[in-house]
Amino acid sequence: MRFLPFLLFLCCNLPLMAQNPNAATDGGNVYAWITPLALLFVLIEVGVEYYYKKGYISFAEAITNFGTAIGNQTMNVLLAVGVYHIYGFLHNSYAPFSIELNVYTFILLLLCLDFIFYWVHRWGHEINILWAAHSPHHSAEEMNFCVALRASVTQRLVSFLFFWPLTLIGFKPMDIYMMSAIHLFISFLHHTEYVRKLGFIELIFTTPSHHRVHHGVNFKYLDKNYGEFLIIWDKLFGSFAPETEKVVYGMYSPPRSWNPITINFHYFTILWREAVAAPHWIDKFKIWFMPLTWRPAGLPPKPPLVEITTQTQIRFSTEMFSMAKPYLIAHLAMGLGLMMLVIQQNSPWEVAERWVGAGLLWFMIINWAGILEKSAWLKWAETIRLLITAVLLISFSNLYENMYYLAAITGLMSASLVWVWRYFRR
């Protein structure tokens, strides 16, 4: 587990999503002060894990979680700009007045957003297309702060499809985006095994115990505890369950892969296959918006679920290439640097170069899966990626003008190529 302090140092940078164009004049980016708090909590968890060695954090799943998070950042930059302009239009055109934030309106906005999110989260477990967007987060088979990073590329988009009524009430788009960041951080804190029950706090607020239940595949825990800030929504609307037995994490029909493409679109492919197989055209459309238990006419019924228990669960694991851990840790650091060049507002890269950089990020995290799964194609794929990345980094950033930077990039990529050809052979 010694690699984790370094990995979780990187975690603090992952929430630095796309910045609002007017962030500098609206009080700055809220993630700038949330980030150190996230770092503090993840380091505490890693320290406790290192000391007690409970086995709550595994290398392959942690790398996969960071990979899905990095891939997600390439989509958040587009989402942030779109949300800002669309929400801005709604607010400027239809809001009867503009609400200024103070202590009371801050709390009101948090409660309103939490209430909307409860229903979005609940629908995400009840409607096929919304579960397809949300299920990547539930495909993790452990519970820790790395799992909190495991969000799909479509999940944030789905959430912002439903937050727009807040603009009509009078809340400013930037305030809604800021509050969604705080809300996201609150949910981040729920992803841990080390915090047990918290007494009277659990009467009102969502706690790690509540959220562990939410991630459980135990039959008694399925579709429970959707609240992120307040647990009272679940108690009011009949979706509450206390933690009374050990939680088994994961999902039914899991992707069984470390590949971020597979993880992100696994349930979409299941729905697509069923839509193609459905004999009636109306059912090919309906299936996307029906409950998970619904089945198109003419297709055999779904087999009954067999409960996954601590005794029957077979967690997904693979044999990785030898000497894969130090390589993946080093390239996670490099990937973070590339990610910041892609998503930062003040990046020296042009728009087209950022799109290319986003493609390189996806190439990188897909190859990580190849390393973790000891795939035959990995050696050549990683060789191509390293060469393309070196050329484009030197070209886009004009590194050829500085011999020290040029030598550093050339040395890193050369060492990586030697590593790949020496160790990543089946």
Image (spheres, helix red, strand yellow):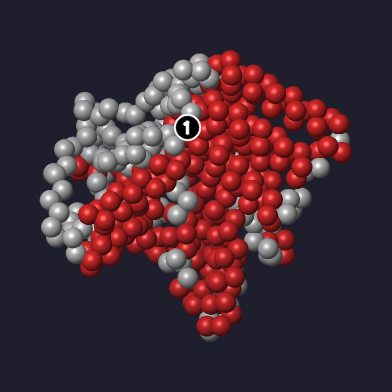
- Residue 33: x and y, percent? 64, 49
The residue closer to the viewer here, 27 or 309, is: 309
The residue closer to the viewer here, 187 or 370, is: 370
Q: Quadrant of residue 79?
A: bottom right
Which residue is drawn at the image coordinates 35% and 57% (left, top)?
A: 130
Give amino acid for label 1. Ala
How many callouts does the rendering have?
Answer: 1
Which residue is drawn at the image coordinates 58% and 15% (left, top)?
A: 422
Work out whether residue 199 can be spotted.
no
Work out whether residue 376 can be spotted.
yes
* Secondary structure under the numbered disc 1 in the rendered image: helix
Q: Residues within 10 Å of mark 1 (few under 14, many from 20)?
A: many
What residue would you read off at disc 1?
A: 369
The residue closer to the viewer here, 302 or 220, is: 302
Q: Where 14 sits versus 288, above or below?
A: above
Q: Where 253 sits versus 164, above or below?
A: above
